[in-house]
Image (cartoon, grey):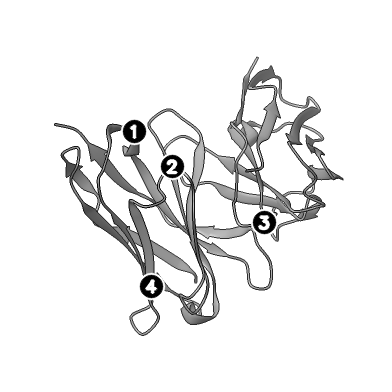
Amino acid sequence: EVQLVESGGGLVQPGGSLRVSCAASGFTFRSYTMNWVRQAPGKGLEWVSYIGSTGTIKYYADSVKGRFSISRDNAKNSLYLQMNSLRDEDTAVYYCTRVAYGDYHNDYWGQGALVTVSS
Amino acid sequence: DIQMTQSPSSLSASVGDRVTITCRASQSISSWLAWYQQKPGKAPKLLIFRSSTLESGVPSRFSGSGSGTEFTLTISSLQPDDFATYYCQQYDGYSRTFGQGTKVDIK
């Protein structure tokens, strides 16, 4: 069974940093591209970042470019999102998603990690 | 960046109704569009990908169509389990933009 479990969410002050992680199981993690998607409270979904299967190719939404960094450790079956210079508007549930093999849509989602940016 | 515009933003419908949600892209995305369903407090669930391909296990009352810039999600006969928010997402190019969502509630 495919499982994606996020961790590392919490409360952080504006300007601070936080790293959220996603532990993957039930599939060959190193073969899949992955995304981070977020959802602010009461709002819609926003794609944040994409990483290729080897970690070489990375894309970011304009709203986080230069502040967030996506990475992965295929030996540990883990995906990461390092968030720096956090702003109030980064408050959201952060979902880790798997991209379908050979395609581009998100076929599995984690349960999400809540990140709250507030003083 | 490609922008996605969903309509309507919300609708009220009854069990058994036929429901149609539209998603428009700011430029052509061929058939690179997916639809997701989200219930309160839960992660989104994939319904349809490549505009019209039904994900395994999704009821056949859901269908998708369209190409280029205009796409449609149709629920042929709304069931109690279908009251939720629906999102389209494009995946043409390096970005993966979502529509703003359509909330379907009970009339």
C-alpha distance separating marks 2 and 3: 17 Å
C-alpha distance separating marks 4 and 1: 25 Å
The residue at 71%/57% (across/down) is B55
- Tell me if mark 1 has few (under 14), some (14-19) or many (20+) residues whose alpha carbon lies within 10 angstroms of its own: few
Dot 3: what SS? Answer: loop
Reading the image, the residue beneath label 2 is A63
In the depicted structure, whether residue A44 falls above or below residue B63: above
Q: Position of residue B34 (x, y in %)?
A: 69, 49
Same chain for the residues under marks 3 and 4 in the image: no
Reading the image, the residue beneath label 3 is B93
C-alpha distance separating marks 2 and 1: 10 Å
- Three-letter residue code for mark 1: Glu
C-alpha distance separating marks 3 and 4: 22 Å
Name the disc covering residue A72, or none: 4
Dot 4: what SS? Answer: strand
- Chain where mark 4 sits: A
